[in-house]
Image: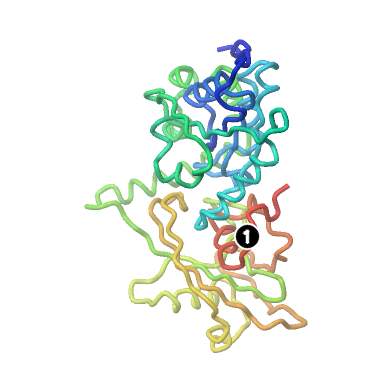
Amino acid sequence: MVPTPAQTPPAYPDFDCLVFIGRFQPPHLGHLAVIREALKRARQVIVLIGSAWQARSLRNPWRFEERRDMLRSAFDATDNDRLEIEPLLDALYNDDVWVRDVQRKVRDVARPCHGKLPRIGLIGASRGQSSYYLSLFPQWESVSVPLVEGISASHIRERLFHSRASGDAYLADDAEHDLPRPVHRALSAFMATSSCSQLLEEQHLLEQYRHAWAQAPYPPIFVTVNAVVVQSGHVLLVRRNAAPGKGLLALPGGFIHPQERLLDACLRELRERVRLKVPEPVLKGSLRDQRLFDDPHRSWRGRTLAEAFYFALRPEQQLPRLKPARGGDQARWVALADLEPETLFEDHFFIIQNFLGLPAGWASP
């Protein structure tokens, strides 16, 4: 498929600006149908790409720049002149922060018409635009585009990585019915990279995980704990030594034992995994908050709940010493100013953000 012919801006457009929000992991023909309709009905189209600055994972394999370039490759120069494609950082567990970020992005990009405030609408496929989603932006009109049946980004990712891990050639056949040709070429090139090799390693682990639980009468739900330990503008993190998330920074934590209380499990992980040289009574006295983090997609393992504990240690001249941790994970103190979402495992950046109130655009380029 070649880039689409230029969409002539309507003489009397319905909207000055239409906004399309998605993750585009990867961009497919259903996404393009929405954007083409938006180009017919608005002078300007703003595409906000979510999950920007996230670490690569099976759910988020492609970075913002890669997805932006794949989208632009499917349109010609005239259409691209009317397309504004911007990154959007997730704000899990805080809809207000996410909505504010969307509003600011649109405010800064939308072009006024003849000195008047632009007429803005929110466009999307009918299935993707739930009433809850629309209720977050009551000031904008809603435009619904018929869904392109049979195309799903999650199914494309699943087939892509599963087929490559098993030696099949999904991209050579079925994907051509779902993907614009330039996107098809970009994904083919990606499959030869080291980034893809690491994701394929995670795909093997995921399939082993699924096989182990295949005979369970119900889908398993896992319970984990995490520790957010902060002192003097630093947070305690470990660098993961193995997949999933090999090389990423993570909050200390792990699965609870059957006969263990949640706080006891968290303290055990700090004692055994990180070997934090802070007496347990001091840690308990520094506990300021605990919260449950339960986004359905937060973990590659499936439904995994995380109870996180926030410890605010007294400022001291020296950060507490850390001994070599078990399992090869390397513990370290990281300055809050140095936190970058794309370097943190799963939703751990958002857990820290939730406790400390970091803004949505924190550390983003």
Question: Which of 154/288 is in front?
Answer: 288
The residue that appears at 60% across and 19% down in the rendered structure is 74
Name, please, the residue furthest toward the left: 217
| Residue 322, placed above or below residue 364 | below
Q: Position of residue 259 (x, y in %)?
A: 33, 76
| Residue 273, placed above or below residue 365 | below
Residue that mark 1 sits on: 239
Colour scheme of this structure image? rainbow
- Residue count near mark 1 (Cα–Cα under 10 Å), binned few <14, some 14–19, many ≥20: many
Which quadrant is home to the N terminus? top right
Question: Which of 75/207 is in front?
Answer: 75
The image quadrant that residue 318 belongs to is: bottom right
The residue that appears at 55% across and 79% down in the rendered structure is 288
Instruction: Work out whether residue 130 can be spotted.
Output: yes
Q: Position of residue 71 (x, y in %)?
A: 61, 26
Horizontal side of 317 relative to 14 (left or right) equals right
The residue that appears at 60% across and 73% down in the rendered structure is 229
Question: Which of 28/135 is in front?
Answer: 135
Q: Position of residue 327 (x, y in %)?
A: 55, 64
Q: Amino acid at mark 1?
A: Arg
Instruction: Work out whether residue 163 can be spotted.
Output: no
Q: Position of residue 54 (x, y in %)?
A: 60, 47
Question: Which of 23/120 is in front?
Answer: 120
Horizontal side of 365 relative to 92 (left or right) equals right
| Residue 345, placed above or below residue 197 | below
